[in-house]
Amino acid sequence: MTAIKHLLAISASLFLLALSGCALTPNTLRPATFYDSQLIDSQSGQPVSLVDVVNAAMHADVVVIGEHHGHQASHLLQARILQQLHNRNPNVVLTLEQFDLNSQSALNDYLAGITGETELVKDAKAWDNYRGSYRPLIEYALHHKLPVLAANAPADIVRCVGRQGPDYLTRLADPQRRQLPEQPFLDTPAYRKKFIAAISSSHGSNDPAIAQRMDNVYKAQLVRDNTMADRILQARKQHPGHQVLHLTGTFHSEQKLGTVALLKQRAPELSVVVLSPVFWPEDGAKPPLLENLNKGDFLYLIQPLPPEFRNSDRRHKAMKERFKDRSGTDC
């Protein structure tokens, strides 16, 4: 029934725009470059401007922008929304999946002018795409004295939960355990179903050992999501009256699952606005709206990322190399 309502809304919107002489075509909606995005209001199915989105989001307690890591359109949109929200309300705090809890002191030193960028990248173990993707956000926060909270769970803890299961957390030293949420495995059935579906195509098996491994990997995912939800709540507690802008991979927030669902589970009174990216394939004559309208309050259409590999042997070799260092984590 919801899908029918969305379809009717889209049809009505396009009809009215056609009457006004502003009919939308793929050429006017389709992002022209990797920096471009087209914002869509999920309730109406209509294209909207950045100003429209910011006006709708400015009174929310939390704004969550899902991203495809490293996609230029995601990061440009994030920077623009941060600026626009801050222009309307100087009390904004950033929470970032892209830095884990162990990075907070390094972030604080950089924002206080104690260290330089290369020191930040090294001390915070920043992602490889920091300078191209997240520098504009951190620099804006630096120049406008905005608080920034590292929001992700430490990567070594996540990996060890994935290998050994949730009991691993009971073996952590007290300082390590206290930095994590009291309930790190809060869950929602819809998110579990989505996660298992996402990994089962390549790892599905009736083998109990593999099923247990998949469950451990899901528990590791929950540590990330619960930690991010916890940090958003900490940001609001540490900075009363501030709006939180949270940036994360889209899987953690689309359909208001993952981090968003856990946040609402713990603080149902919060108002949360979610923006989610949607790829528009080159061979798609029309934007893929109907099947994606449930992904957020607003969508932003972007060009798909190019495939990393077309040769399966080279892909496998690269994956082994990429995770080689991680395999040495001492649990």
Image: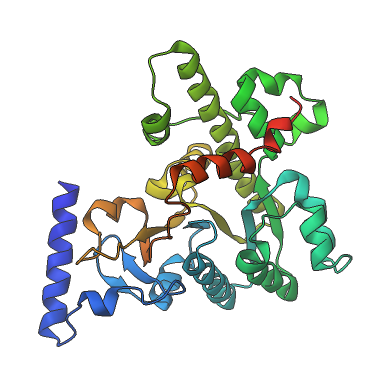
Q: Position of residue 200 (x, y in %)?
A: 39, 29
Outermost residue, top direction? 208
Q: Position of residue 295 (x, y in %)?
A: 35, 51
Toward which corner of the image does residue 53 lie, by quadrant? bottom left
User: As drawn, is 106 to the left or to the right of 84?
Assistant: right
User: As drawn, is 35 to the left or to the right of 113?
Assistant: left
User: As drawn, is 307 to the left or to the right of 78?
Assistant: left
Q: Quadrant of the C terminus?
A: top right
Counting the numbered discs, the total is 0
Residue at image x 46%, y 54%? 272
On screen, residue 24 above or below 238: below
> Quick check: can you spot residue 258?
yes
Q: How is the image coloured?
A: rainbow
User: As drawn, is 137 to the left or to the right of 174?
Assistant: left
Outermost residue, right direction? 114
On screen, residue 141 above or below 308: below
Residue at image x 36%, y 69%? 39
> Quick check: can you spot residue 259?
no
Q: Position of residue 188 (x, y in %)?
A: 43, 31
Residue at image x 12%, y 66%? 11
In the depicted view, which residue is nearer to us: 191 or 208? 208
Toward which corner of the image does residue 15 lie, by quadrant? bottom left
Outermost residue, bottom direction? 21
Residue at image x 41%, y 49%? 254
Q: Position of residue 59 (x, y in %)?
A: 48, 65
